[in-house]
Image (spheres, rainbow, N blue to C red):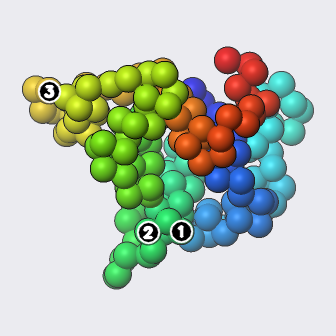
Amino acid sequence: MTNNDILRRLRFIFDFSDSQMMALFTSGGFNASRELVSDWLKTDDKPDFKALRDVHLAIFLNGLINKKRGKREGEQPEPEKKLNNNIIFRKLKIAMDYKDEQILETMELAGFPLSKHELSAFFRKPGHQNYRECQSQVLRNFLKGLQIKLRGNLVDAEDTNL
């Protein structure tokens, strides 16, 4: 999954307007214009498409955490310059304030069951012996389950391209 795919899916899942998307970027520490957000949301076959860099997705996810959980006191976290699926998954877990059981239920909704041990491996530090890299398939199914949970069985145009 590309960063742009993730951004499009999150916009659909939470039904964010352009203004809300811009506000999330601002909350994360970056003033994104409506045009830039629009270009990030386009599919890669459109002429105005712009690839979303890791740092900008991290800023958006930090803004999502601020919106869902409230801004934390003091200095805001520095956005990561390099993202992987594990970091994205962790940020979504924090934003939704999900416990392991809620994530496992969400994965079940998508028809992608995981064990608690498999799930905990994604949230370990990279050097840990039980650390496991989160594959795109896991993240995609978590987003699919989140969509079912929050929006019902609505079909996003992106899902028809899977």
- Estimate how packed mark 2 is, as few (under 14), some (14 to 19) or many (20 or more) residues with alpha carbons within 10 Å: few
Residue 9 figure quarter = top right
**Residue ID for mark 1:** 67
Seen in the picture, residue 25 relative to 143 is either above or below; the reply is below
For label 2, the SS is helix
- Distance of label 2 from label 3 (alpha carbons): 29 Å
Seen in the picture, residue 131 relative to 150 is either above or below; the reply is above
**Residue ID for mark 2:** 69
Labelled pair 2, 1 in contact (Cβ < 8 Å)? yes
Where is residue 28? Give x, y as percent: 53, 65
Mark 1 or mark 3, which has the lower sequence index? 1
For label 3, the SS is loop
- Distance of label 1 from label 3 (alpha carbons): 32 Å
Seen in the picture, residue 126 relative to 24 is either above or below; the reply is above
Question: Residue most toward the right?
Answer: 47
* Three-letter code, disc 1: Lys
**Residue ID for mark 3:** 130
Where is residue 104? Give x, y as percent: 35, 35
Asked whether 141 or 81 is in front, the reply is 141
Q: Residue at x 71, y 65 (%)?
A: 20
Task: Tell me the quadrant of the picture where the N terminus can be found.
Answer: top right
* Three-letter code, disc 3: Asn
Question: Residue most toward the top?
Answer: 162
Q: Is residue 46 visible to the viewer in this orientation of the structure? A: yes
Task: Tell me the quadrant of the picture where the C terminus can be found.
Answer: top right
